[in-house]
Image (tube, rainbow, N blue to C red):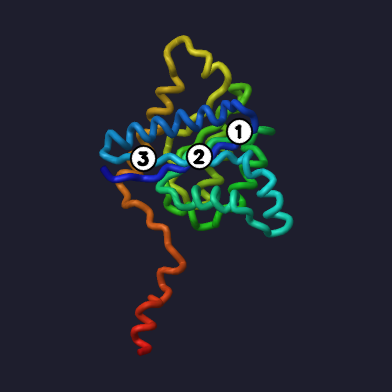
Amino acid sequence: MATRTLAVLSAGLGQPSSTRLLADRLSAAAARLLEARGLSTTVEVVEVRDVARDLADHLVAGATTPALRRALETVQGADALVAVSPVFAASYSGLFKTFVDVVDRDSLRGVPVLLGATAGTQRHSLVVDHALRPLFSHLGALVVPTGVFAAPEDWAGGGGDPLAARADRAGAELADLVAARAPRRTVDPYDAAPDFAALLAGGR
């Protein structure tokens, strides 16, 4: 079975975090629906809170720590991305935007992306479409039509599980995009370097 890599970008600040919970739910749905299409999935999670100080150092001093480099490589090299932010001041969080700001400008171009957001009230339910979707469209990503927003009552249960239905619909849309594309090939900057053994042999 062919394998695709799914990066999960979660900007939740607490532990446990409803943002991380939603990110896990979306990535699980996408992985299950990819498997139904004959593709196994490697899921790699980036918690933005874990590299918050690294991001500040990078912005003010230009220093990229190994942890931040690994996080960026995970997001920039994946076949698809699930990105979830909490809502602060009617938009994505500043920490989430800071991470996106340091992602290579062209690395998400054409990459399938599933978006999600969490907030303390349903009043912010349009944040995916008025804030997150324009951000990732600016980066040239292929954003799936269904964004998933979750407020506290979505986790309470009762009356079925509408959050699961939305996650499945968004996961299916992401799986369709990923299954229709060849796996991404990370460009190794040393691929173009001449073979050292061949150079030695040619020099004899």
Instruction: Pick the residue in front: 63 or 81.
Output: 63
Residue lying at 30% horizontally and 46% vertically, measured from the top left: 180
Q: Quadrant location of residue 86?
A: top right
Quarter assignment of residue 162: top left
- Quickly name the residue at label 3: 41
| SS for dot 1 | loop
Mark 3, secondary structure of its residue: strand
Contact between labelled residues 3 and 1, with CB atoms less than 8 Å apart: no
Q: Position of residue 176 (x, y in %)?
A: 32, 40
Query: Which amino acid is tagged 1?
Result: Gly
Q: Is residue 162 above or below residue 81?
A: above
**Identity of the amino acid at label 2?**
Val
Q: Which quarter shows the N terminus?
A: top left
The numbered mark at residue 12 is 1
Q: Residue furthest right?
A: 60
Q: CA distance from mark 1 to mark 3?
A: 23 Å
- Residue 114, given in percent of the width and then of the height, sits at 45, 38
Amino acid at dot 3? Thr
| Mark 1 to mark 2 CA distance (whole Å) | 12 Å
Left or right side of 195 for 135: right
Residue at image location 45% in from the left, 52% down from the top: 77
Q: Which residue is mark 2?
A: 45
Q: Earlier in the sequence, mark 1 or mark 3?
A: 1
For the residues carrying marks 1 and 3, which lies nearer the camera in this image? Answer: 3
Q: How far apart are labels 2 and 3 at the CA level?
A: 13 Å
